[in-house]
Image (cartoon, helix red, strand yellow):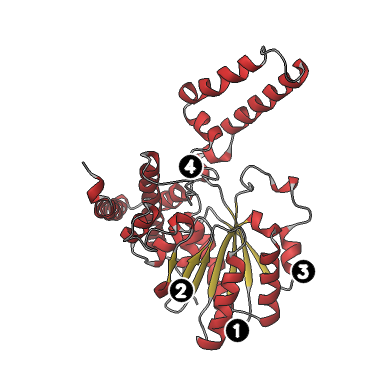
Amino acid sequence: MAQGPDIWSLYASMRKSRLFEEAVAGLWEQGLVSGEMHLGTGEEAIVAGIVSHLRDGDAMALDHRGTAPCLMRGIDPVGLIREILGRPDGLCAGRGGHMHLFSKNHLTASSGIVGAAGPAAAGFALAAQHLRPGAVAVAFFGEGSMNQGMLMESLNLAAVFELPVLFVCKDDSWAITTRPDASTRGTMSERVRGLGVRYDETDGLDVEDVWRVAHHAIARARSGQGPTFVHARCVHLDGHFLGLLLLRIAKDPLVEMPPVGVPVTRSLFTPGGAAPPDRLAGVRDIMSSIVATFRDPRRDAGNDPVLRARRVLESDPQRLAQIEARVDGEIESILAAATSELVT
């Protein structure tokens, strides 16, 4: 009988990932990270449940939220932060930023192009099939990628060649600010099965459930039984990217609402422009979005996979405290080493 998941080890990886990304968020908020910042907070159970099965010779193709998989795969965390900061001693000499992380030694590549993880993983898997029998490739992507032709072509190619690849869809029901039902018809399972790929679902907030689904899918791939598509539902706790206005308003309405509300109110009485009914309709849409955000699942602690995993372990508080102290210390050391010359 197969051994089950080690929830303690999985939780340690998830906590380390969460604290690492929170540290990166702090650097971004200080203005030390250029451009957008896409965090994987909320995806930790999916990543840990998948990556914990990988071994030397396996490959990963990542999307624009590649920090957590890289960290859990063992890529130098100081190099990751230095890369995100745009430093020449970063993982990719500071030229890739957080969306384009590459490590040849770990057979890992990421891209900010939506859906690009599909063909990259298919390429990794084709190479493994010929050069490293028993090795697998994993592709991580969001559900919005399922409307990209290259991902659909990759699924078809993987089925035709019976490639050892795992396609992992991290579905948070948002394609930036678009709901799937506004852009997609049919179901994901119908699309995947129609291309001849095995389709499995998992609760992306439950690391043990993800682990078990991944265990069987990766075993199938290693034994030459072809690709599997894993549909994992999750919640992006920080939205599509850091600084998302609606989430900022929900977290701190007294600070964030006036810069929005004052000009919107003033626009109702400005001469010229749209007719009053149209202006009122626009204000209603804005207020409706704000009110909906206060009920958004991203604000529900029950949708935090790290907290859910932690609750399972609270029956042994001493061991839990020891693990958390160790992980917290590791993150403090990593952040200190990566930002030493930034401290004044």
Secondary element at image label 3? helix
In the rendered structure, which disc, 1 or 4, sits on the residue that comes first in sequence? 1
Name which quarter of the figure residue 230 lies in: bottom right
Say if 339 sits above or below 151 in the image.
above
Query: Local crowd at mark 4 within 10 Å, few (<14), some, or many (≥20)?
Result: some
Please, what is the three-letter code of the amino acid marked with disc 2?
Answer: Leu
Q: CA distance from mark 1 to mark 2?
A: 20 Å
- Kindly identify which residue carries mark 1: 224
| Position above or below: 144 against 2 | above
The residue closer to the viewer here, 118 or 267, is 267
Q: Which residue is mark 2?
A: 107
Q: CA distance from mark 4 to mark 2?
A: 28 Å
Check disc 1 and give the amino acid type: Gly
Q: What quarter of the picture does the C terminus occupy?
A: top left
Report crowding for label 3: few under 14, some 14 to 19, many 20 or more residues within 10 A (C-alpha). Answer: few
Disc 4 target residue: 242
Measure the C-alpha gap from mark 1 to mark 4.
41 Å
Q: Left of 227 or right of it: where is 311? A: left
Mark 3 or 4, nearer chain start: 3
Nearer to us: label 3 or label 2:
2
Q: Nearer the viewer, mark 3 or mark 4?
A: 4
Asked which secondary structure carries label 1, the reply is loop
Residues at marks 3 and 4, CA–CA distance in whole angstroms:
36 Å
Mark positioned earlier in the residue sequence (3 or 1): 3
278, 51: nearer the viewer: 278
